[in-house]
Image (cartoon, helix red, strand yellow):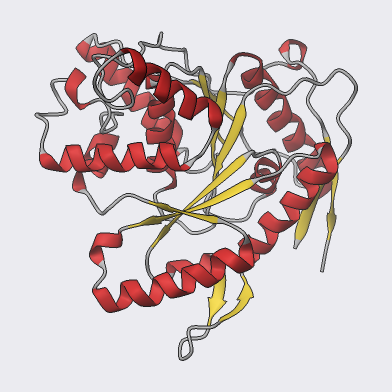
């Protein structure tokens, strides 16, 4: 396994914004859906939000945002948009050159977003890459969506099928622990790891009890917090093609009328935002509620409007970026 080693930030480095990485090395866990709903939820609270797609092959978050821009243009609806940047993989073949190039691409893109954004949400690929490890090392919060099954819990640890005892952490858990150490050494910061449990409603009572038991042990051993996730709802998948979220339903004609499924899904998004335990988010929710009735997260009639930002398809130029702690070359570990 390789780990990223990072240098001390240069003098005068100013970090602005809270960095949230959506990470899981298994596909189909709902990373992009989680990331997009988190982005729109924060925008609707009036925060300036940047988004970064480091999954250069799939680019699911980028397609989601492009679909949203098309809906905005067709319906002339001023839906909020993040400032978006795609970080492409390096074209080099030599590992040292590749990692140096990707460090440069990532840190310049992140620096540009941190100048103007309160939050930066990063969607990572469903496999182990250098860019993914690098992004995790800069995170303030890591959200790992997992489907509630023992197949999907394998991304966290190996579990004995007979005794349900945790045998050892997974490669992903070990990687995240390494990046926590790197983050602490680099700037004294910490990473709040949240595991988001999706599709709970699909399990029978026995499976729920078994998985809950294992999750409690994993929480103690691996040091993450649990968060209620999204149920299996068709509405989440349908909205992707329009670039919409369940928070946009009342503002667009194509998203249809408000149903019980929409209401339940919106509540799940609201619960996720509360679970983050980020003081500025909690304060903004309380501030809006103190002055107006309704739900400040999901009600477009009271949520602050954001000016749509222009999405960017490539990294910014180095001349326009402030200084960000630049990692040293990665080293190999057994």
The number of numbered discs placed on residues in the rendered structure image is 0
Image vertical order of residue 158 relative to residue 52, above or below? below
Q: Is residue 98 left or right of residue 292?
A: right
Q: Give the quarter of the image for residue 61.
A: top left
Specify the quadrant that holds the N terminus: bottom right
The percent coordinates of residue 302 (x first, y second) are: 28, 14
Q: Give the quarter of the image for residue 150.
A: bottom left
Residue 296: tell me if it is visible: yes
Q: Give the quarter of the image for residue 274.
A: top left
Residue 80: tell me if it is visible: no
Determine the residue positioned at 88% across, 38% down: 7
Determine the residue positioned at 57% across, 71% down: 157
Determine the residue positioned at 80% across, 20% down: 323
The residue lying toward the viewer, choosing from 39 and 58, is 39
Image vertical order of residue 187 relative to residue 114, above or below? below
Q: Is residue 78 left or right of residue 65?
A: left
Image vertical order of residue 198 relative to residue 212, above or below? above
The residue lying toward the viewer, choosing from 309 and 241, is 309
Q: Is residue 244 left or right of residue 131?
A: left
Specify the quadrant that holds the C terminus: bottom right
Determine the residue positioned at 53% across, 83% down: 165
The residue lying toward the viewer, choosing from 262 and 245, is 262
The percent coordinates of residue 276 (x first, y second) are: 49, 40
The percent coordinates of residue 189 (x first, y second) are: 75, 39
Instruction: Please identify the residue farthest to the front as the structure is shown.
Output: 290
């Amino acid at each position: 396994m390789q780990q990223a080693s990072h240098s001390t930030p240069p003098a005068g480095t100013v970090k602005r914004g809270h960095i949230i990485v959506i990470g899981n090395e298994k596909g189909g866990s709902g990373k992009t859906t989680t990331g997009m709903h988190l982005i729109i939820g924060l925008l609707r609270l009036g925060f300036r939000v940047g988004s970064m797609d480091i999954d250069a092959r799939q680019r699911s978050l980028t397609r989601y945002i492009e679909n949203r821009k098309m809906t905005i243009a067709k319906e002339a609806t001023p839906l909020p948009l993040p400032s978006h940047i795609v970080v492409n993989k390096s074209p080099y073949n030599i590992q040292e050159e590749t990692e140096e190039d990707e460090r440069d691409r990532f840190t310049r893109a992140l620096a540009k977003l941190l100048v103007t954004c309160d939050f930066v949400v990063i969607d990572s690929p469903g496999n182990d890459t250098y860019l993914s490890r690098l992004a995790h090392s800069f995170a303030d919060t890591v959200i790992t969506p997992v489907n509630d099954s023992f197949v999907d819990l394998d991304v966290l640890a190996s579990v004995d099928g007979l005794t349900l005892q945790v045998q050892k952490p997974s490669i992903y858990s070990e990687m995240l622990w390494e990046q926590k150490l790197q983050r602490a050494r680099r700037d004294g910061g910490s990473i709040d790891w949240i595991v988001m449990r999706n599709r709970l409603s699909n399990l029978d009572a026995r499976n729920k009890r078994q998985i809950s038991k294992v999750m409690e042990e994993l929480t103690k051993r691996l040091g993450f917090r649990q968060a209620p996730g999204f149920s299996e709802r068709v509405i989440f998948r349908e909205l992707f093609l329009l670039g919409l979220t369940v928070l946009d339903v009342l503002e667009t004609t194509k998203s249809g009328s408000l149903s019980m499924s929409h209401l339940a899904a919106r509540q799940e998004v609201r619960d996720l935002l509360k679970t983050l335990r980020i003081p500025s988010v909690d304060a903004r929710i309380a501030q809006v509620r103190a002055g107006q009735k309704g739900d400040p997260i999901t009600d477009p009639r009271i949520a602050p409007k954001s000016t749509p930002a222009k999405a960017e398809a490539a990294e910014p130029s180095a001349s326009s970026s402030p200084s960000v702690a630049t990692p040293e070359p990665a080293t190999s570990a057994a």
